[in-house]
Amino acid sequence: MPRVQPSADVADSAQLGEGTSVWHLAQVRENAVLGENCIVGRGAYVGTGVRMGDNCKLQNYALVYEPAVLADGVFIGPAVVLTNDHYPRSITPDGTLKRGDDWEAVGVTIKTGASIGARSVCVAPVTIGAWALVAAGSVVTKDVPDFALVAGVPARRIRWVGRAGVPLTDRGNGTFECPETGETYTERDGVLTRDA
């Protein structure tokens, strides 16, 4: 059964999976779908129709705007922002307030096991690859490959990481090893894959 703190605001049409927790002052909007065992931290925001897989963690004050899609096991650090507009404006050229149907929302897609570090911003539309790691304070403006560690403004790949999240050891000839799990990986043409 989901657990929702009394100070949280969860829309009646939102779907919360078994074991999911929504903490103080968080908001989950209409038609959002959260999988099992998710955690939505204090003050976090989940936009209308956002889709989250199982075992996702949204830390305090993270802002996940629609139409974001998070796969299983995604970690969103404190105060991360996933944007949803190419060219944001409050008003139209004639000075009238823009309405919801005056623009087309674009989303951020985050694949299985990826982590977004504290206070990072992902500028939609971008895709963060499986098991990738975005360093704290980064601004992501282009797609991030699977297993990439990206950092900076704008974010650029600086290392490869394994499924444990730690940087891989370069063994030469395009081969890498995780110092924590012993898993091995191969890089070909800028793409890293885990060996079977």
Image (tube, rainbow, N blue to C red):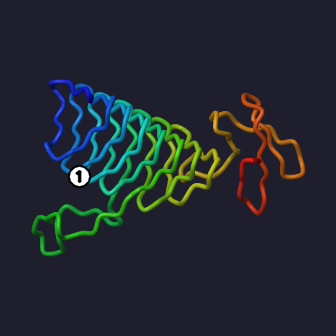
Q: Would you call the spot at circle 1 few (<14 residues within 10 Å), some (14-19), or many (20 or more)? A: many
- Is 86 on the left or on the right of 72, as rendered? left
Q: Determine the image quadrant of residue 87.
A: bottom left
Q: Residue furthest bottom?
A: 94
- Spot occupied by residue 187 in the image (x, y as percentages of width and height): 78, 54
**Could you tell me which secondary element the residue under label 1 belongs to?**
loop
Q: Determine the image quadrant of residue 102.
A: bottom left
Give the labeled residue for mark 1. 48
Q: Residue shown at 75%/35% (left/top)?
A: 178
Q: Identify residue type, mark 1.
A: Thr
Q: Tell me the quadrant of the picture where the N terminus can be found.
A: top left
Residue in the foreground of this view, choosing between 147 and 157:
147
- Spot occupied by residue 43 in the image (x, y as percentages of width and height): 26, 32
Q: Residue shown at 44%/51% (left/top)?
A: 122
- Spot occupied by residue 103 in the image (x, y as percentages of width and height): 24, 69
Q: Residue furthest right?
A: 173
Q: Residue shown at 64%/38% (left/top)?
A: 163
Residue in the foreground of this view, choosing between 186 and 117:
186
- Spot occupied by residue 130 in the image (x, y as percentages of width and height): 57, 49
Q: How many marks?
A: 1
- Is 90 on the left or on the right of 82, as rendered? left
Q: Determine the image quadrant of residue 24.
A: top left
